[in-house]
Image (spheres, rainbow, N blue to C red):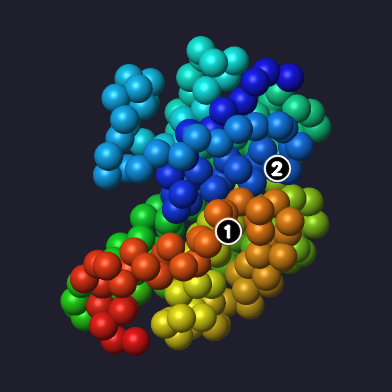
Amino acid sequence: MPKIELISFKLCPYVQRSVITLLEKNIPFDVTYIELDNKPDWFLEISPLGKVPVLRINDDDILFESAVINEYLDEITPPSLHPEDPFAKARNRAWIEFGSSLLMTSHRLRTAEDEESLEKERSLLLTQLNQLEAQLKGGKFFNGERFSLVDTAYAPVFCLIDLLDRHFNTGLLEHLPGLKNWSNNLLQRPSVKGSVVEDYEERVLQRLQDSSAILIRQS
């Protein structure tokens, strides 16, 4: 097994995707945290996009982008967390990409500074969540009963939505029973529980408190 180091920011949902995959695959790894507001020079030298996560393999080889990192981790530790059927695998990859757009919308929602922006992002997020609901076929996870890489992509989305629902009464999954069931199953999974820092919730709320987010002003 190669030596794995994950370079991370403590609240990055894209990093969280890779931590879930590492835990699911039982891959030993080290984590190095950086501050995105003060990126060290050594990090900028190895991260072409200046973003986390970055995976450093055997001290020298570098991968970036969470979806690519997760594919690599999956391939070096069989059995795969992808479906075997080529179409099902491709479909999962497409919906992993859709999950990235959900993360961006949820970020814009919680950082919106005025009522108009908040409602715009809430409407878009609900549209995206309804699109996702229509793809579910029943069962515990996206593909049914078997956990897969597409689930690693959406667990951070549901972590954020759960936090927003509990603290700001957003009710985002109120009329989406399939997503509510999927979310509950993911949030109870040990790899998901272990994918965030111990004070994750306090850190998210503090960042909102320190910002101009209207969610904080309304609460």
Disc 2 designates what residue? 23
Q: Label 1's element?
A: loop
Task: Decide if residue 147 is on the left or right side of residue 36.
Answer: right
Task: Decide if residue 59 is on the left or right side of residue 128.
Answer: right
Q: Nearer the viewer, residue 171 or 89?
A: 171
Q: CA distance from mark 1 to mark 2?
A: 16 Å
Determine crowd level at label 2: few under 14, some 14-19, many 20+ residues with C-alpha closer than 10 A: some
Q: Residue at x 65, y 41 (%)?
A: 21
Q: Nearer the viewer, residue 207 or 190?
A: 207
Amino acid residing under circle 1: Glu
Above or below 46: residue 108: below
Number of on-image labels? 2
Determine crowd level at label 1: few under 14, some 14-19, many 20+ residues with C-alpha closer than 10 A: few
Q: Residue at x 26, y 83 (%)?
A: 217
In the rendered view of the protein, which quadrant contains the C terminus? bottom left
Q: Nearer the viewer, residue 162 or 120?
A: 162
Q: Quadrant of residue 73?
A: top right
Q: Position of residue 153 (x, y in %)?
A: 56, 49
Amino acid residing under circle 2: Leu
Q: Residue at x 32, y 69 (%)?
A: 208
Residue most extreme to the top: 60
The answer to whether one can see residue 144 in this image is yes
Q: Residue at x 37, y 68 (%)?
A: 206
Tell me the number on the disc at residue 67: none
Tell me the number on the disc at residue 198: 1
Q: Earlier in the sequence, mark 1 or mark 2?
A: 2
Q: Quadrant of residue 136?
A: bottom right
Which-is-in-front pick, marks 1 and 2? 1
Q: Label 2's element?
A: helix
Task: Decide if residue 144 is on the left or right side of residue 39.
Answer: right
